[in-house]
Structure formats: structure tokens, C-alpha cells
Amino acid sequence: MNEDTLEQQLYDEEAETFRNQLATVTDDGKRNWVYPKKPSGRFHRTRIVISALLLLILFLTPFIKVSGHPFILFDFLNRKFILFGVLFGPHDFHLLVIAMISLVVFVILFTAVFGRIFCGWACPQTIFMEMVFRKIEYWIEGDSKDQRKLNVAPWTGKKYFKKLAKHTIFFTIAFFISNIFLSYIIGIDELLKIITAPPSEHLQGLFAITVFSGIFYFVFSNFREQACTIVCPYGRLQGVLLDRDSIVIAYDNVRGEPRRRYKRDEGWENRGDCIECYQCVEVCPTGIDIRNGIQLECVNCTACIDACDDVMDKVKRPRGLIRYASLNSIENKTKWKFTPRAIGYSTLLTVLVTALTILLINRTEFSVTVLRTAGLLYQEQPNDMVSNLYDLNLVNKTFDEIPVELRLENIKGELKLVGNKIVMQPQGNIDAKFLILLPKSELSRMNTPIDIGIYNGDKLIKKVSTSFLAPMKKKDE
Ligand code: SF4
Ligand code: SF4
């Protein structure tokens, strides 16, 4: 290995050492608390509007009802899901599988093309942390410098008051959030019952709300950015999902290097646009330096873009030293293009979404299965009649209780239920047996096609076809 190559390798290794350590963990393994500076700028203002809109949707959706039922419900305990007012149950498992596969492909495609844009703009963790809890912290404890000072200051009445006020508000909001999330699982009516009835009547619900509130309070008051950098599987998958054509929040090293502190009378020749002001590092809620390159800790919050744009305005250089861009577009100074990988994912996603849409459009509210009872052929009956015994399975996917009756549609004969009248329970699954009796005169062949109508009153809700077995006619009959 020649000297130049060795020197370059040592330089590269040194430049990458930041990847050996989490910005939020000290050398001796302790927590390095991040005090991000208050963000401001055009991206932050837009994020405030979008976050407010998303929070409004999150908080109002449980109150929306369609025909008296929730608009959205994820009742995992009873395996009952309502999406946009349509009820889905265990019998829709195939739809769930296709929807999950589509979602995974969508996430992969979206990330391969647009990076972690979801984390910064729509993830509930980022929105609650940066737009709710962090804002309250700034309001009570001040900007990053004041927070640092307060944390190392001796415990005075003022410090007790600030800390108590902050944590009381934090816990109240965590309690509110846990109630909202619970309403997505058990429904707003059930939640209101838990809230209004004496606690002793709803110990399970009370326990669930307390646990949820405790978890949310811990995450937003203490765990914070570590939820994204340590726990979130999506964050940890970035290494395999992103490539050099993905759009990420990136520092333009071609334009920014060599970086150097800026002196007022100095020109911009033989230097980069980065003035080493560290504003991008100070605002970062995960404590990283974006100038080191793409890092899994970056949640795409855009704070560093705003901070750097502000600096560029002050030193009269063009904005966008940190911006949404792909690594290839920065290095080659080219425009972003649709890569073969993105085309492949898009094709697969289109196929899956088309299949899912077709299945959803053709999804019926009832499913009926009629099979001739196994092991039986036909039975000769008095009065020149022949009977076949059938097994019936009915699934009611609606919210309503529906009494049904069965009628022969295409042939004269008798249909006798074995047992009582059939009443389908909401989301119910019912098995029954019935006999079809046909006169021999109606049977010209061994296997006769039969249509059976399932009626609710006079309303035909489903029609199924089956076959009727009869003895072979002798030639002289
Ligand atoms: S804010 Fe911009 S100029 Fe300042 S250190 Fe960061 S990249 Fe460089
Ligand atoms: S690097 Fe920039 S975009 Fe990424 S988390 Fe830090 S401030 Fe936000």
C-alpha cells in the first residue's frame, strides 16, 4: 500500500468515527441529554400547520360515527376492525394480509425514494415530541441555554415550581393521549363509560389507561429521541432502505467544504460556504451533526435546514447548503431521477394495490357456503320424492342481526331446514343443515344444478349454486 492510499484510508476511518458512538450516549455509557435550540423558519412553520392538522384528525376521528358505529376502530381484543365505517372481521384475514404486504412495499418504496420524510412530517412520536411536549418545555423552562442552566442550578422554589408545572402538564397530556389511543381500540362510547362510571366498575380499563399514560409520560419526558434512534424498527432499517438516489436531508459537502469560520472582510474564494457556526448541530433534537453524512439518528425534522438557511441569509450566500437532496445529485450536481429500484417497487406496489382494490370492491357483506353433506349421496323418499342433505355456513359481516330463510330458485321442490329458523348475529358465523326434496319427475339426469336464494324477508341477499344427486333413470322409465 503506498503512502497516499494509507493516508486516505486513515483519513476516511477518522472521518467515520462518529458512527461508532451514539450522540446521546457519553463515553462511559451515560445518557447525554440533548438540549436542542428552539427551531424557527419556513419549514418549521409549515410543519406546525401540518402537525396541527394531523393532531386535529387524530383527536376528532374517534368521535366520528357512521350509522351509529365508529368510523375507525382497531378492536384487537375482539378481532374487530372498522375502517371508514366498514366492518372487517376474522373472515377478512386475506384482505389484512394483502393490505399489510402492500403497506410494507409502500414503506420500502416511499423510503427508497423520499427517505424518512414520514418521520419528520407525520410520525406521531416526532409530532408529539417536537410540536407538543418540547414547545411546553420551551415555554416553561426557556430555550436550550436556560434549560441547561436550570438543570444544574440548585433546587430553589422557582426550580421546584418550573419542574412541577412541566411534569404535571406532561402527565396530563400523556393521560389525554392515552385516552385518545384507547378510544381507537375500545371505541369512544366504551371509553366514556369508563371515564364516567365509578373506577371500581372498570378496573381493567382504569389499569390500561394508567399504564398507557405512564408509558407516554416516560417516553416524552425522558426517553425522547431514543425512541427513534434505539427502539423504532423503521429508523433502524434506514441503512438497507436508503440508497444514494434517495431524497434525504443532506449537507451539500461539495458546496460547503472546506469549511472554515467566517470573517466579515474575507471573500468566498478558496473556501466552502459552511462557516462552522454549528447552528445546524445546536437545533438538532437527536444531537447529531448532519455534516457528517446520512445517519440513522436523523428524523428529518428539517430544523437544521431552517437554521442553516438563516445563517446563509446573514452571510449573503444562497440558501440550501442543507436541503432535501440525494447524495448522487449533490456529488454529480444532477437532478433527481427515477431509479430502476424505484420503478420495480412502484410496479409491485401497483399490482398489490390493484389486487387489494378489486378484493375490496368485490367484498360482500355476507358469505354463504353450501356443500352436500359428505358421505351421503341421495335418499329415496315416499311419494316419488328424492332428497339430498346439505351443510350450510353463513357469515354475517354487518353490524345487524339478520333473520334469513332459504328458497329454491330454479326448480320446484321443497327445502326443509333441520332445526330452528336461522338468525345471523352481527359479525356472526352460523352452521346449519337442510334437506332439499325434489319429485323424480323434475329430475332428468343424475346431477341437477340447483340455485338457492338466501332471503331476509323479501330481500334476496345472496344466491348460491349447488347440485342435486338423483338415481340414474332406467332406459324404459
Ligand atoms: S448551519 Fe450551515 S454554515 Fe453553520 S455549521 Fe451548519 S452547515 Fe455550516
Ligand atoms: S440532522 Fe437535521 S433533520 Fe436530522 S434530526 Fe437533526 S436537525 Fe433534524
Image (cartoon, rainbow, N blue to C red):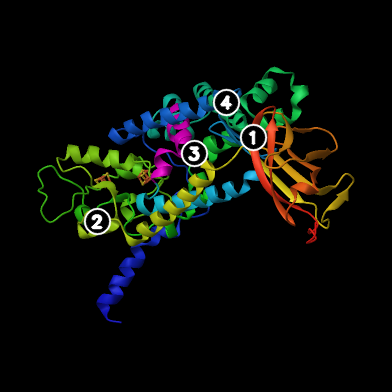
- Looking at the rendered structure, the secondary structure element under dot 4 is helix
Q: Is residue 119 magenta?
A: yes
Whole-number angstrom distance, CA of label 1 to CA of label 3: 45 Å
Whether residue 393 is visible: yes
Q: Between tags 4 and 2, which lies in front?
A: 2
Which amino acid lies under the numbered mark 4 shown in the image of this protein? Phe
Q: Secondary structure at mark 2?
A: helix
* Residue farthest right in this picture: 382
Q: Upstream in the sequence, badge 3 or badge 4?
A: 3
| Label 4, label 2: how far apart the Cα atoms are | 44 Å
Question: What SS does tag 1 mark?
Answer: strand
Image quadrant containing the C terminus: bottom right
Label 1–label 2 contact, CB within 8 A: no
Q: CA distance from mark 4 to mark 1?
A: 44 Å
| Dot 2 amino acid type | Ser
- Please state the horizontal and vertical placement of residue 77, each as a whole percent of the image: 69, 38
Number of residues whose C-alpha sits closer than 10 Å to that of mark 2, classed few (under 14), some (14–19) or many (20 or more): some
For image coordinates 25% across by 48% down, the residue present is 276
Using the image, determine if residue 276 lies above or below residue 418.
Answer: below
Q: Say if residue 226 shows up in the picture.
A: no
List the residue tagged with mark 3: 125
For the point 48% across and 33% down, the residue is: 128
Position of 33 compared to 15: left or right? Answer: right
CA distance separating discs 3 and 4: 15 Å
* Range of residues picked out in magenta: 117-136
Pointer 1 residue = 461
Up the image or down, 60 lies above or below 128; here it is above
Q: Nearer the viewer, mark 1 or mark 3?
A: 1
Label 3 Cα neighbours within 10 Å, binned few <14 / some 14-19 / many ≥20: some
Mark seen at residue 176: 4
Q: In this figure, which residue is indicated by the disc labeled 2?
A: 329
